Image (cartoon, rainbow, N blue to C red):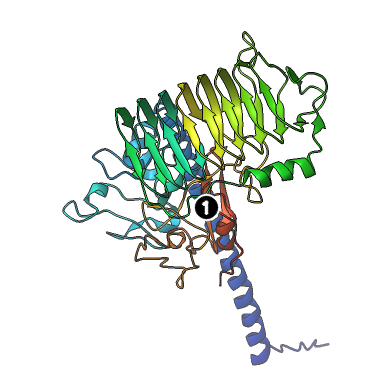
Amino acid sequence: MKLHYNRRGFSLTEMIVVLAILAVLITILLAALSRAREYARVATCLSNLHQLSLAALSYAQHNRGALPSDYQLPGGYWYKEITPYDNNIAANAICPDAATPSNGVGSATTAWGPENPAGPFGWLQGATASYGLNNFVNPGSSIPGISSFTSVSLSGNQTFSGTIASAGSITGGGNLTVYGNLQAGGTINTHGHVYISGTQTPNMPSQQPPSVATIYQNIENTDNPLPVSGSTRVINFNNNPYQIINGDLATSGQIQIIGSGTLLVSGDIDISGWFPANGLGTANINLVCLGNINFSGQVNINGGIYAGGGLSLRGRYNLSGVMVSDGAFDDSGRGTYVQSPPPSFDPRAGGRSITEAQPLFGDCIWVDGSPTATDAVPTNLTLGDQTLNANDQMGRFCIDRHLGQINVSFTDGSAHTVPLAQLWQLNWSGNFRAKTVVVP
């Protein structure tokens, strides 16, 4: 008995279908592999930025808290400044997705540099990098330590570590030392024994401190401050971190501060004694006053001082925090001020909390950038803004380097992947206002 087998082969149609399925599977597999490789490059890039931030923070510890700069000086600008704190700077400054030098401005896929020593950017010679510095973290410039709506007058014996900003003029005399920048909407006039380590920028537009009245109202409406009970010679925050005095706070005696918190004063503050009381060290307190603030005694405060009117310091002081005056700031006293992170509430009144970390380094086509919320989305996300327009600098960071995103490190040492549209939501500077944009 013979067995007959039907040896029918694949039809042409079936083979085409099989090949098509295989092609689809291979395409999916290759895309998955490509995406996996990209994720690996993103991880390397994040690690690089983290290392750069750690080096920058180490630099700051040895330079009076000042972070690296973009100053065009021999040995200056961030790459050279942090090199002693990063033993692998040449590798850490290169993103795997933009490792090829461009001999100039970079792009989403190329690094900036190296530059011709004889050219206009010769100070960048010897460096190639895929990242740029947020210029607003230059010494004290990110968040003005002292802000005045009208004028700043310094005529005593003071040492300031931080930026001083005025919507009007700044006048400095006496024995004045400022480790930071001076920024004024009007003139800057210094005389006498004055030393300024940072930049002096007069006639600077858009110099406007936050509204103290709005800050006051926000705290009053959202934090339910309790009226100060008993004598105003003792402020006890142990029961509530927000307290209020409806009227003036005026005394020539000593004031005892228990605990830490925020004190609202609807009138004026006039203190000629010790604040806090002698022997109690430094008061951890935020003062928000709708009227004038006048200190003529000994003041030791770690926190924010906000005056809806003028702010005057005529005695001795040791201050750390931020000081804002919607009137004039007049300091003829003697003491030391150190800019430090603002208090827990938002001193920009309706903006983002500036206690959060600032962008420090990011994927970038150039060595630095000073983004503002009014900057437009670049028309070409591969090239960014190749013109290096001084008035439109978000385009240096807004590039399609990592699947519609870039990597950014922050002043707290962290590093994150940020979608391009969210670049307009970051806290680039103390004056930055978040904005919603559409990125194609």
Tell me which residue sits at (56%, 67%) in the image: 30
Q: Quadrant of the N terminus?
A: bottom right
Pick the residue in front: 264 or 109.
264
Q: Is residue 301 above or below residue 223?
A: above
User: In the image, is 351 to the left or to the right of 226?
Assistant: left
Closer to the camera in the image, 9 or 61? 61
Is residue 11 visible to us here?
no
**Residue 145 versus residue 416 in the image, above or below:** above
Image spot of residue 21 (x, y percent): 66, 78
Give whichever of 216, 240 is nearer the camera.
216
Secondary element at image label 1? strand
Residue 89 appears left or right of 353: left
Q: Position of residue 125 (x, y in %)?
A: 24, 48
Q: Residue 331: x and y, percent?
A: 47, 29
> Which residue carries the number 1 mark?
407
Residue 264 visible to an observer of this rendering = yes
Q: Please name the residue shown 45% across and 72% down the image.
A: 380
Left or right: where 408 falls relative to 188: right
Question: Residue 246 occupies which quadrant of the picture?
Answer: top right
Nearer to the camera, 53 or 243:
243
